[in-house]
Image (cartoon, rainbow, N blue to C red):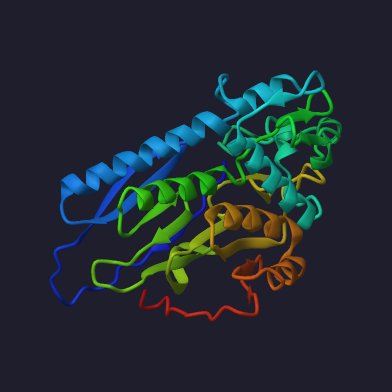
Amino acid sequence: MRYLTVVLLSLMTFFSTAQKKFDHKMKLMGSSFTITVVAENQQEADKHIKVAVEEIKRIENLISSWKETSETSRINKNAGIKPIRVSKELFSLIERCQTISRITNGAFDISFASIDHIWNFDGSMKTMPDSSVVEQSVRNINYRNILLDKKKRTVFLKHEGMKIGFGAIGKGYAADKAKSRLQKTGSRAGIINASGDLTTWGRQPSGKKWTVGITNPLNKNRVFSWFPVDDRAVVTSGDYEQFVELNGTKYSHIIDPRTGYPAHGLASVTVFAPKAELADALATSIFVMGADAGINMVDQIKHVDCVIVDKNGNILKSKNIQLNTINNEEN
């Protein structure tokens, strides 16, 4: 699971309003979620927050590979055995994942889950994994071997030992679905922040846009840029929250599915997109692809922007985004 830091910057309100901002933090999908809603009172806010939590839990029960009863677990248990018929929702999600895999030439691949037992970033890992074990596991990673039958709505993992997992897209998808449910049930504005996979709608009680700050990956207590966000998603992938140091080298938790080893070269990637699901997948992909290939890809996708910080602290960005720099001596 990846933990990303996107800092919400408070904007000052210069006039009174009947609407207020209500925040609720909790742990969902094994991660920290903050649900923010604009409402007239706590009772109204609690009603909306309950709707969001129920939707996020529903998504977890659908996509979690750790829950034995989930459709995803059924697919994994039958790898190399038989196709599994799934819901329209999960089938569509996997289809979209396959599209991103093709666009990124395999830098994004949900079948990377077959290697998730090899690398641990909880502090327990003390030595590098055996290269032969990594090599063997990588053989099971190939999005082309996730076979989809649209007519029968089945998913089949071609080889025994294959697994799929939504760690690189699941929280973004859950944030999008919670936002959609809240909008349908009358929530006028808010933010779903799934450990940095963030999506917004509406505006603050002051009438101003929501504002997000991007953490400096070389000093995570500082913000190096801020952006106004209007009905948009923002996701940051970085190496500063989850990593392991072995033999004096820092290894990010973001694994290159093509090699089985942690991606390197970048410190953080922030992606702005219409949906958190897309921003989530692209942020991971760019971290694996590298700055040049990532920016070239983003520049060809409408309504998507990115900001990249490399290992040396250099800031790179896609062509259509303007940085609003912050003087960190004052921050």
Residue occupying image coordinates x 80% and y 37%: 141
**Would residue 255 be visible to someone looking at this image?**
no
- Asked if residue 217 lies left or right of residue 181, the reply is right
Q: Nearer the viewer, residue 125 or 120?
A: 120
Horizontal and vertical percent position of residue 77: 70, 19
**Would residue 91 be visible to someone looking at this image?**
yes
Horizontal and vertical percent position of residue 209: 36, 72
Q: Nearer the viewer, residue 178 or 235?
A: 178
- Asked if residue 157 lies left or right of residue 230, the reply is right
- Asked if residue 294 lies left or right of residue 63, the reply is right
Write down the quadrant of residue 286 in the picture: bottom right
- Asked if residue 293 lies left or right of residue 331, the reply is right
Q: How many marks?
A: 0
Write down the quadrant of residue 18 in the picture: bottom left
Residue occupying image coordinates x 81% and y 32%: 137
Q: Nearer the viewer, residue 284 or 80?
A: 80
Horizontal and vertical percent position of residue 91: 66, 37
Name the quadrant of the N terminus: top right
Task: Please say if 273 is above or below 85.
Answer: below
Residue occupying image coordinates x 86% and y 34%: 139
Horizontal and vertical percent position of residue 242: 56, 46
Name the quadrant of the C terminus: bottom left
Residue occupying image coordinates x 70% and y 55%: 285
Task: Please say if 220 is above or below 110.
Answer: below
Write down the quadrant of residue 85 in the picture: top right
As drawn, the residue found furthest toward the front would be: 151
